[in-house]
Amino acid sequence: MLERIFKRPKKQKPPVIKEPAIIFGRYSDNNKPVVKVNKWNEAESLFKAKKYTASITAFFDYLKDEDEENVLHRPLENGGIFELYQGSKIIRGSYDLERLEAEVVLAVMPQASTPVMRRLLEMNFTLYYCRYALNENKLCMLLDSDIETSSPTKLYYGLKEIATKADKHDDLLVQDFTSLLPIDTEHIKELPEKEKEIKYRYFKKWIQDVLNLINSVDADKFSGGIAYILLALAFRIDYLILPNGKLLYELEKIVDIYFKKDDRLITEKNQEMMDCFTQLASKTKAEFYPYLFQSRYTFSITNPQNYKTIADAIYNANQNVRWYKENKHYKIAAQISEYGFSYCQYSYSLPKPVTEFFKLFMIVNYPAYFKELGFEQWYYNTDTKEFNKEAIIAKVESIEHLWKLKYADLRFKTANLKFDNMMTFNQSFTNEIEMLNLETR
C-alpha cells in the first residue's frame, strides 16, 4: 500500500492528435508494400511465359495505389483498357493481343501555330518512349508498343515518361502560347480558399524573411551560407506549399541556377537566385492560386537512391554548420541543417519513414504555419522558445514502430536529440537521420 502511495507515477506519452488531411511533398511510388512487389514479380514471370495480357493485368495491379485511386484498369476478353492519373493529366490507353497504345491530351490548338509545332518538335528529341502528336486540333503525347515487347520494365518507364512529361508541360505550353487552351482537367481538386490564402501569405513571408537575413550579412564573406539558405527556401516552398505548373517550373529554375556547372562565382549565382525570389514574391493571388491544387499521381518525379547518398548529403551539410555556430550565426546554421535534409526530400524519392521524419522536422521548425493549417499538436512554442520534448519523442517512436515490419533495424536514437535551441535541434535531428539503417527485410 505504501508503495502505491509513494511510488512516482509513470510519465504518460502525449496522445496522438489526428492531423488535417493536407498533402505535403511530391508523390513517391517507391514504398510499395510486399503485396505490390509480389505483383511486379508475377508480371515479370507471366511476361517470360508469354502470357502477355495476364502480365499487363498484374502490372496495373502493381501500379495501383488504393489510397490515391490513381489507376483504373478493366480487362476485356482479348485485351483491356486503362486510365492513369498524374497531376493535371489523365493517360488513357488500351491493349489487345498485338499492341498496347496510350494517349494523353495536353491542350487544344484552335488554329495551326508554327511556334507551337516548333516547340513540340524540339521537345521530341528529349523523349525515349513516347512522342508529341497532333490529333485534329488537340496536342497529344502518344505511346505504343508491340505486345510481345511490352515487358513490365518497358511499360513502367514508358508510361512514367508520358505521364510526368505531360503533367509538367501542359501548363507551360498553355502559359507560353496564348493560342492554346487547357483541356481534360476536370479531375483536379481545388484547394479550400483558406488554405490557398495561408500558403500565399507564408510563401511571401518566407521569401522576405530569407532576403532580410541575407541583407544583414556580408554577401562575399557569407556566400556559402547564403547559397544554402536560398536553396533551403526553394526546397521548403516545394514541400510545404506544393506548387504546380509554371510556379513549380520557376522554382526549379532557381535551384538550377546554383547547380548549373559554369564558371560564375557563388556571389553572382546568389544574386540571381535572390532576384528570382523577389520576382516570385511579387506575384498576385490571381497569378499564384491557379497553381495550387490537389490531384492523383501514379509516378514519382524523382528516383530512389541508395541510402548512403542521402546520408552523405546530410553529413556534408552539417559539416558546414560549425563556422556559423562558432560565430553565433544561429539562424543561418539552423537553415544549413535544414538544407541538407530538404535537399534529399526535394531530389530523391525517399523511403516512407524518412519522409515522415522530415514532416515532423518541418512541423517543429515552422509551427505557426502548421497551426494556421489546423494542426493542433504543438512541438515548438515560438513565444517561449520551448520544445515539447515528450511529443517529439513520441512521434518519432510512433513512426519507428509503424515501419518496423519493413525496416527491422530502424533505430532513431531520441536520447541524442538536443533541445537547447533550433540550431542544436536541427543538427542533432538530422545527425540521427544520417545514421538510420533502412535495410529492408
Image (spheres, rainbow, N blue to C red):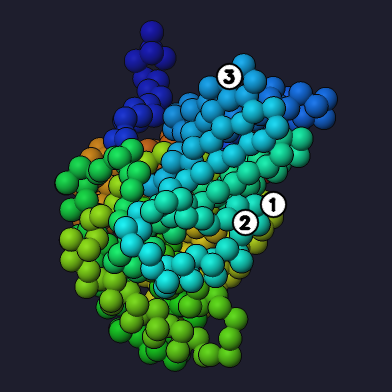
Where does the C terminus fall, quadrant-wise?
A: top right
Q: Name the residue nearer the viewer: 21 or 182.
A: 182
Query: What's under tag 1, amino acid-wise?
Result: Asn
Tell me where residue 284 appears, x and y as whole percent: 18, 66
The CA distance from mark 3 to mark 2 is 44 Å
**Label pair 1/3, CB-CB below 8 angstroms:** no
Element on which disc 2 rests = helix
Q: Position of residue 180 (x, y in %)?
A: 33, 60
Q: Mark 1: give few (<14), some (14-19) or many (20+) Cα within 10 Å.
A: few
Measure the C-alpha gap from mark 1 to mark 2: 7 Å
Q: Does residue 143 show up?
A: yes
Is 383 placed left or right of 68 in the picture?
left
Tag 1 secondary structure: loop
Q: CA distance from mark 1 to mark 3?
A: 40 Å
Which of marks 3 and 1 precedes in the sequence?
3
Q: Which residue is mark 1?
A: 306
Depth order, front residue of 201/149: 149
Q: Label 3's element?
A: strand
| Kind of residue sitting beneath label 2 | Ile
Q: Which residue type does callout 3 highlight?
A: Leu
Q: Which residue is mark 3?
A: 76
Residue 432 appearing in the image: no
Comes first in the chain, label 3 or label 2: 3
Q: Residue at x 50, y 65 (%)?
A: 120
Q: Given contact means CB atoms under 8 Å apart, are the residues at marks 1 and 2 in contact?
A: yes
- The extreme top residue here reads 1
In the picture of the structure, the residue carrying the numbered disc 2 is 310
